[in-house]
Image (spheres, helix red, strand yellow):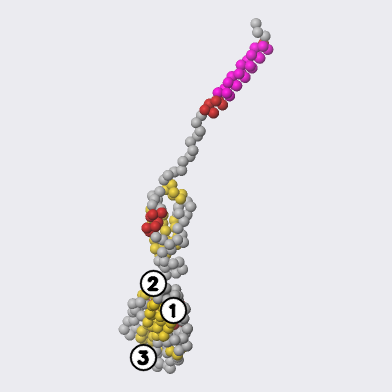
Amino acid sequence: MIPFFSRHRVAVALTAIVLMFCVTVGVILFLLAPPPPVPRTNPHMIVVPAVVGTVYDSDQFVKEYPSIKLIVEYKFDDTIPANQVISQIPPAGRPMSAGDSMNITVSKGQQRVQVPEVRENEGIDDYTARAEAVGLVVKTVVVPDDRPMNTVISTSPAYPEEVDSGSIVLVMICQSVCPGLGEQTSPDLSRMTLEAARSQILGLGLAVGGITYQRDKYPAGTVLSQNPAAGTSIMPGNPVNLVVSSGPAG
């Protein structure tokens, strides 16, 4: 008969052997097991590109991002040049599924408006209301005429010319008794931009006359010369003709 303590030692030894066997088998199985699969990037997911501030070109966009469905909205903007992207949804850097829509807003530049036509016997108040309704600023000049007081005689620029919203329109009117009209001095417009020259001419109560373009080394839109010349006396409402650069010869 095996003593009690001997049987206990045998049981402990057997237990230890079983545990070692289990650990050994576990280690072998772990070493022989295949590595876990590496997560794959979803081929149908893309990153939203950053387009705000870029010049929108539909053909180029389709070429670079063929899997994005683009929805374009255009709006006028007084500060952002035409065709430049103002905003986008979703924002750049976010994941999106191929074929999803992306909305962008593209600038149409500053709004152009048509100078209102002068109606027969129209008063200055009525004309001013119509001009301001389309975003123009009216500046009046008194000129000799025998029509009723405050009747609009003409404008500069005139209908149907289109100008930037916010531009000045010079409106010629006559009071019941025309006062003596003081002479103005033709300003020096040399090397100004056409828009700056136009604003200065109208601001002095003069009219913008003919504009002739010619090739020159100066950038397109630069005033090269004027008639009457700078410093010449000129009556209010009279035109100042301009010669403007169309850019260097190509």
- Characterize the magenta stretch by its predominant secondary structure: helix
Query: Could you tell me how many numbered marks the image carries?
Result: 3
Residue behind mark 3: 145
Q: N-terminal of the two: label 2 or label 1? A: 2
Which residue sits at x=37%, y=58%? 59
Q: Is residue 192 visible?
A: yes
Q: Are marks 3 and 1 in contact (CB under 8 Å)?
A: no
Q: Secondary structure at mark 3?
A: loop
- Mark 3, Cα crowd under 10 Å, few <14 / some 14-19 / many 20+, is some
- Looking at the rendering, in which quadrant would you find the N terminus? top right
x and y percentages locating residue 134 in the rendered image: 39, 74
Q: N-terminal of the two: label 2 or label 3? A: 2
x and y percentages locating residue 74 in the rendered image: 39, 63
Which residue sits at x=63%, y=16%? 13
Camera-side residue: 245 or 210?
A: 245
Q: Secondary structure at mark 1?
A: strand
Q: N-terminal of the two: label 3 or label 1? A: 3
Camera-side residue: 235 or 250?
A: 250
Magenta span:
5-25
x and y percentages locating residue 66 in the rendered image: 38, 52
Q: Is residue 170 visible?
A: no
1 in relation to 107, above or below: above
Numbered label attached to residue 223: 1
Residue behind mark 2: 112
**Is residue 196 rendered magenta in the image?**
no
x and y percentages locating residue 30 in the rendered image: 54, 28
